[in-house]
Amino acid sequence: MKYITSKKRLILLIVLAVLIGGFAYFAYYVSDYSHADNTALAALSSTGSYNVVDNSNSITFTPTVNKSSIGIIFYPGALVQPEAYSIIAFKLAMNGYTIIIVKMPFNLAIFGTNKADDVIAQHPEISTWVIGGHSLGGVFASDYAVNNQDKIKGVIYLAAYPNTNASNATFKALSIRGSLDGLATSTQISDNLNKFPANTTFITITGGNHANFGNYGVQKGDNNSTITKQEQQNLTVNYILAFLKNLNK
């Protein structure tokens, strides 16, 4: 009996060590995230054109003039500080669109796929919703849209593609990637082409890369862009504005 007890104790100690090691690795992994640069942080202040509310759950840019009834929910890329997407957000707000950047647990959208439910519930003044995201944020934004087609009218994929088949979805979609993207490559997009909604507009920004959609520095595995971050973001905003303009047609 003593032998059996000792063996069980050893197994428990091994299991405990594995769990502790796993938790330690996860804590290290999620703590090593990309931070927003000073340009992005400076864009978090309200202006005469829009108000910014930054709380523990989200960052909301609300237009003060010419406010559209269309709202945009945005899921950040994996391990990227949500503030990094404030440049694209404020430019959309200046054009009349309310945009809510969702803050994810551990900066990973996989742990907050359904956070859009709370956003929608908190904004009854918005009648039409578009959801989008960058990289893995776009993947899980798409998952939410597929499972909530009664709530979502459009999906924006920035350097992203559907994980769940969305080919029969009722919503429209916009896919934008940079030609030099080293993470969401043209091959990956092609391999998942049959999963995109039937009504998807595909845009490739010549000279753009993966990280230029946000303001968080260089990303490992990405290629250097041949256009500036500002140029890529301005083009992205213009493509999104065209998509939103034709959303209900």
Image (cartoon, rainbow, N blue to C red):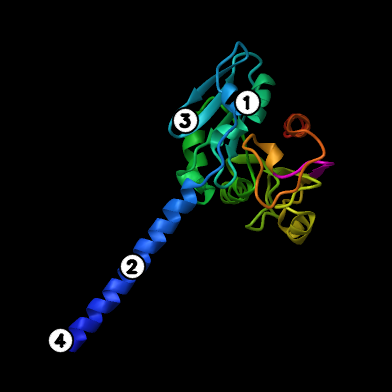
| Residues at marks 2 and 1, CA–CA distance in whole angstroms | 43 Å
| Residues at marks 3 and 2, CA–CA distance in whole angstroms | 43 Å
Residue 14's quadrant in the figure? bottom left
| Residues at marks 2 and 4, CA–CA distance in whole angstroms | 22 Å
Does residue 142 appear in the picture of this structure?
Answer: yes
Give the image location of residue 164, x and y in percent.
62, 57
Q: Is residue 122 left or right of residue 21?
A: right
Q: Which residue is mark 4?
A: 2
Q: Which residue is mark 2?
A: 17
The amino acid type found where label 3 is placed reads: Gln
Residue 175 magenta-highlighted = no
| Residues at marks 1 and 4, CA–CA distance in whole angstroms | 65 Å
Give the image location of residue 15, x and y in percent.
33, 71
Sequence-first tag of 3 and 1: 1
192 versus 88 height, above or below:
below
Q: Which residue is mark 1?
A: 39
The amino acid type found where label 1 is placed reads: Thr
Q: Secondary structure at mark 3?
A: helix
Sequence-first tag of 3 and 4: 4
Q: Secondary structure at mark 4?
A: helix
Q: Judge the density around disc 3: few (<14), some (14-19), many (≥20) Cα neighbours within 10 Å.
A: few
The amino acid type found where label 2 is placed reads: Ala
Who's the residue at 55% across and 18% down the image? Answer: 45
Q: Secondary structure at mark 1?
A: helix
Q: Which residue is mark 3?
A: 122
